[in-house]
Image (cartoon, rainbow, N blue to C red):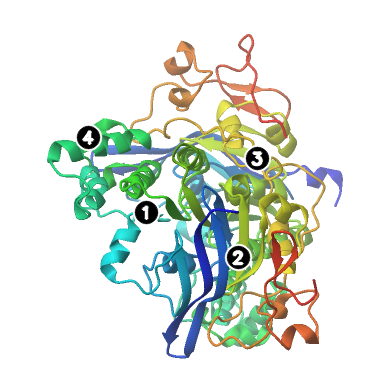
């Protein structure tokens, strides 16, 4: 039997706005195997970041269940949540705003250690911080510097060291390389993959960059307006793309190679409003193959071949 | 169009040097840059943050903010106009009608208190001297050209999405049929499906109008998709330039090699990425020799001593690297 570290069941997160309920995450279910990487891809506003934060209960879910290591963490007190969070961490997108500018590298990396009292004694903590800095490839001389003295790549290494400080089993990586230049991006991606291999970490990797997710994810979930529209093993998703939105997304990836002029599957229009969405396929308005059936109900996510799930009336 | 006018040069940059002087520090943003572009061609200006791409684009139009910016040397010739010698008044006539620019962020490049119709019409009123009513009518036509219904001309920028705003910015840039369009990361702030729409639109407009274009980007995928020629910038210099095939299939500069090898390959996911070690040097403290030498695995003692010379491999392909031509030097690219 597969060993699932995380199971999400009918997770919803709605935000109240002036115009109605904003369905940021709308009935998302999936399981994540230990030691694997699930890539969550989608465009701005599809709910991928909210999904990541809701899983860690950094925002409270509206409804649904989150099982971490078999335990339901949705109802638990903040004290036991604090305990659970030692094992689940997050790396943020923007290494410029996710670090406190008034804290030195030492303070930032040691903060989770001090807050959770997993270690006592300045000496011991400092040794641990230096060890973590070594793990993520930061030279020891930076220990007393401030974030503004460092470049984006090094700052992101600090964010990773901080996430690793409590020896978590599971990390949500929320666009960790989007703010970085390609040469630096490659350094961070290699680091994340090495850490996973060494420590057996499980990742949810949130990104809009399909080339990146293809490179490091075992499975990919494609989100559109709060829902997963397709999920499959990475190779399967690229080889047998089923959902029209995934097809458009894959065909829009700019590939750095000279080739015959590609026929882009251009989709019309733009993402519609996530506020009070009607009961219909949310992609129907932009979909080249949509008909009356698509606007009559919300298609459910169903398995069409082992491990390949798709939510489309036409598949 | 006959063959001769096709090969006509639209842009000539010679020895362009731009510094930003901040207090005691001199930031050497662009250093002795040479570049030319022929009519109807699209050039991809590629490089990472801080390479000097945007400064180059602004300097071409003499739009460098001064202070702190200083154009230290160089000449720029756009369609026979010697930009550096022109008065402010003459420059205003040229910007928009001869050379036009699209900025990265469509959220900040539009004025929030004017309707999009008015913002497009403004260009017509200034350059063609026509009354507002007539200009608005032309603006509506222009909106349709970029794929926006004409009745939206009376709406304000905040009523448009990011992709639509970028279409409006493109409309403004094209009002007076510029010969040269400079697009500074026009799709970086947009989602991939919207990016594909905008690139498709730009390609069609460019082809329909016989315009030349400079596409500033850090994404080699976009370059492959839309450009004919490529210039790779590093620390304010062009380190390699050539046709799309020269750069993509016959890479000669170690930095270009590094850029390609650090990209994930969509066709081969098990391939390990090869990052470029280290960081781009601080443009206020550039090394005496090749700026890439500290990160370069091919670097020898001659690299750090002086600036590498330009080597012309063919009529189109130039590389500025001292290692080129050295015995046994060859670039290692990932297998496709």
Q: Which residue is mark 3?
A: B230
Query: Which tag is nearer the camera, tag 3 or tag 4?
Result: 4
Query: Which tag is nearer the camera, tag 3 or tag 1?
Result: 1
Query: Which tag is nearer the camera, tag 1 or tag 4?
Result: 1
For mark 2, give the secondary structure. helix
Q: Which residue is mark 1?
A: A87
- Have a look at marks 2 and 4 and say if they share a chain: no
**Nearer the observer, A160 or B266:** A160
- Examine the rendered structure and indicate whether residue A150 appears above or below residue B335: below
Chain designation of label 1: A
Residue reaching furthest left? Answer: A121
Alpha-carbon span between mark 3 and mark 1: 47 Å
Alpha-carbon span between mark 1 and mark 4: 21 Å
Residue reaching furthest bottom? Answer: A19
Q: Which residue is mark 2?
A: B173
Q: Which residue is mark 4?
A: A127
Q: Which mark, by number, is residue A294?
A: none
Please give the name of the residue rendered at 38% of the width and 29% of the height, measured from the top-left corner. Answer: B286
For mark 3, give the secondary structure. strand
Pointers 2 and 3 in contact (C-beta within 8 Å) = no
Q: Picture coordinates of residue B176 (x, y %)?
A: 65, 67
Q: Is residue A38 left or right of residue A231?
A: left
């Amino acid at each position: 039997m597969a060993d699932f570290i995380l199971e999400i069941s009918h997770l919803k997160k709605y935000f109240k706005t002036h115009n109605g309920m904003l369905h940021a995450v709308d009935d998302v279910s999936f399981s994540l195997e230990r030691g694997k990487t699930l890539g969550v891809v989608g465009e701005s506003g599809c709910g991928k970041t909210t999904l990541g934060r809701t899983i860690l209960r950094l925002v409270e879910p509206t409804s649904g269940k989150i099982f971490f290591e078999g335990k339901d963490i949705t109802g638990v007190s903040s004290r036991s949540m604090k305990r659970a969070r030692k094992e689940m961490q997050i790396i943020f997108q923007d290494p410029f705003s996710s670090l406190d500018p008034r804290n030195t590298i030492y303070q930032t990396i040691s903060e989770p250690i001090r807050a959770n009292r997993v270690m006592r004694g300045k000496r011991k903590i400092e040794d641990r911080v230096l060890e973590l800095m070594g793990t993520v490839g930061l030279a020891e001389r930076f220990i007393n510097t401030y974030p503004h003295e460092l470049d984006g790549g090094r700052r992101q290494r600090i964010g990773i060291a901080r996430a690793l400080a409590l020896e978590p089993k599971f990390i949500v990586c929320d666009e960790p390389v989007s703010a970085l230049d390609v040469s630096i991006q490659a350094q961070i991606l290699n680091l994340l993959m090495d850490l996973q291999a060494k420590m057996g970490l499980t990742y949810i990797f949130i990104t809009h960059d399909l080339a990146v997710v293809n490179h490091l994810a075992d499975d990919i979930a494609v989100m559109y307006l709060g829902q997963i529209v397709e999920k499959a093993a990475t190779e399967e998703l690229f080889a047998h793309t089923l959902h029209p939105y995934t097809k458009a997304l894959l065909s829009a990836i700019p590939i750095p190679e000279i080739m015959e002029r590609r026929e882009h599957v251009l989709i019309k229009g733009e993402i519609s409003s996530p506020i009070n969405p009607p009961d219909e396929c949310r992609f129907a308005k932009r979909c080249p193959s949509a008909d009356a059936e698509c606007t009559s109900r919300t298609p459910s996510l169903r398995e069409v071949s082992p491990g390949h799930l798709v939510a489309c009336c036409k598949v | 169009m006959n063959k001769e006018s096709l090969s006509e040069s639209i842009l000539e940059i010679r020895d362009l040097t731009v510094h930003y002087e901040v207090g005691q520090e001199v930031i050497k943003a662009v250093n002795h840059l040479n570049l030319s572009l022929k009519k109807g061609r699209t050039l991809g200006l590629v490089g990472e943050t801080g390479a000097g791409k945007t400064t180059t684009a602004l300097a071409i139009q003499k739009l460098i903010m001064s202070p702190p910016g200083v154009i230290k040397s160089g000449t720029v010739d756009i369609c026979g106009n010697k930009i550096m010698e022109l008065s402010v008044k003459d420059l205003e006539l040229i910007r928009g009608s001869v050379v036009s620019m699209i900025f990265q962020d469509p959220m900040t490049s539009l004025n929030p208190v004017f309707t999009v119709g008015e913002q497009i019409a403004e260009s017509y009123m200034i350059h063609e001297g026509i009354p507002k009513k007539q200009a608005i009518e032309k603006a509506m036509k222009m909106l349709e050209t970029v794929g926006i219904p004409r009745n939206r001309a009376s709406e304000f920028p905040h009523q448009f999405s990011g992709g639509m705003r970028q279409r409006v910015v493109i409309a403004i840039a094209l009002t007076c049929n510029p010969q040269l369009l400079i697009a500074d990361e026009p799709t970086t702030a947009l989602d991939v499906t919207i990016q594909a729409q905008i690139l498709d639109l730009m390609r069609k407009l460019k082809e329909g109008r016989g315009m030349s274009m400079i596409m500033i980007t850090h994404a080699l995928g976009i370059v492959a998709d839309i450009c004919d020629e490529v210039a790779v910038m590093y620390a304010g210099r062009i380190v390699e330039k050539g046709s799309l095939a020269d750069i993509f299939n016959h890479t000669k500069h170690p930095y270009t090699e590094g850029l390609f090898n650090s990209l994930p390959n969509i066709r081969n996911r098990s391939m390990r990425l090869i990052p470029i070690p280290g960081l781009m040097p601080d443009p206020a403290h550039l090394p005496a020799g090749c700026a890439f030498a500290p990160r370069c695995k091919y670097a020898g003692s001659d690299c750090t001593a002086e600036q590498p010379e330009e080597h012309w491999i063919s009529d189109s392909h130039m590389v500025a690297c001292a290692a080129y031509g050295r015995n046994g030097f060859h670039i290692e690219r990932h297998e496709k």
